[in-house]
């Protein structure tokens, strides 16, 4: 617990030294707020209530975090910090809980901001926050795994971007193509999209799919940590 707390604290300090990453947690809900306020929903029949909130929330959970986490992990590799941690006996779950835990906390705060901007009932807000936190966790794991396989922050950014685009935009394309929709069903981002766009949908299948994604991504991270940690 002490090791995890130390890594968490280190990550928090690093975050506040990096405005480019920090602003990401603010800019997405800010854009959602601006679009919601200035594009008057009652005056525009083509704009559904909470449309911009759910849209930007999905993009944040499915895209923004992947590149940010990948870059953070890759920086630890580039600066040899990860190598020292592995030599010191830091386990994969300790490192992941420390770094990922901070991003998860920041992502949860951002999710709450989205919920406050939207016009949700109490039940809808609860479902929204649950699905957002789980989606955020999955993106953190994916970003962490990509970061582990990257030599430096620049390489991580280049590698993470295609994954982020595919993960983030596939659900949007799925709305216009049935074949893509079937394929996208295995992605956690598609399940986020399903829930935030229709809170009456049964949450059992989306939660199972997201849980499966998290389990697989956790296993991939552990493998990457053990193989790449000492090489960092």
Image (cartoon, rainbow, N blue to C red):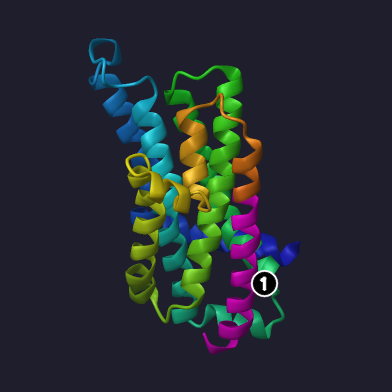
Q: Nearer the viewer, residue 127 or 72?
A: 127
Residue farthest front in this picture = 179
Q: Residues within 10 Å of mark 1 (few under 14, many from 20)?
A: some
Indicate whether residue 229 is drawn in magenta. Answer: yes
Residue 18's place in the image compared with 107, above or below, is below
Residue sitting at x 38%, y 73%: 153
Q: How many marks?
A: 1
Residue 106 x %, y % = 52, 46
SS label for mark 1: helix
Residue 171 seen:
no
Q: Tell me the chief SS of the magenta region.
A: helix
Viewer-nearest residue: 180 or 79: 180
The percent coordinates of residue 124 (x first, y second) are: 56, 23
Q: Position of residue 137 (x, y in %)?
A: 57, 52
Q: Which residue appears farthest toward the bottom when viewing the image?
A: 231
Q: Report whether residue 195 is seen.
A: yes
Q: Quadrant of residue 176?
A: top left
Residue at x 39% of width, y 66% of height: 160
Classify residue 93 as left or right of residue 32.
right
The quadrant holding residue 167 is bottom left
For the N terminus, which image quadrant?
bottom right
Residue pictured at 49% horizontal, 27% vertical: 198
Q: Which residue is mark 1?
A: 92
Is residue 210 shown left or right of residue 47? right
Image spot of residue 16 (x, y percent): 44, 54
Q: Which residues are magenta?
A: 210-232
* Residue at x 43%, y 23% (from the top left corner): 118
Magenta highlight on residue 178 = no
């Amino acid at each position: 617990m002490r090791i995890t707390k130390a890594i968490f604290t280190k990550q928090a300090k690093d975050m506040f030294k990096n405005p480019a990453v920090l602003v990401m947690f603010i800019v997405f809900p800010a854009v959602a707020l601006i679009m919601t306020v200035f594009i008057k929903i009652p005056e525009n029949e083509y704009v559904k209530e909470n449309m911009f909130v759910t849209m930007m929330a999905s993009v944040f959970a499915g895209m923004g975090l992947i590149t940010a986490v990948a870059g953070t992990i890759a920086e630890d590799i580039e600066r040899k910090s990860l190598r020292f941690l592995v030599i010191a006996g830091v386990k994969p779950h300790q490192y992941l809980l420390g770094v990922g835990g901070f991003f998860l906390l920041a992502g949860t705060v951002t999710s709450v901001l989205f919920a406050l901007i939207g016009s949700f009932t109490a039940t809808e807000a609860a479902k929204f926050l649950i699905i957002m936190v789980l989606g955020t966790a999955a993106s953190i794991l994916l970003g962490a795994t990509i970061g582990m396989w990257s030599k430096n922050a620049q390489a991580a950014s280049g590698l993470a971007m295609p994954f982020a685009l595919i993960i983030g935009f596939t659900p949007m394309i799925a709305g216009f193509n049935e074949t893509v929709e079937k394929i996208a069903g295995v992605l956690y981002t598609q399940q986020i999209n399903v829930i935030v766009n229709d809170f009456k949908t049964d949450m059992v299948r989306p939660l199972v799919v997201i849980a499966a994604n998290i389990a697989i991504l956790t296993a991939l991270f552990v493998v990457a940590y053990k193989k790449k940690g000492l090489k960092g």
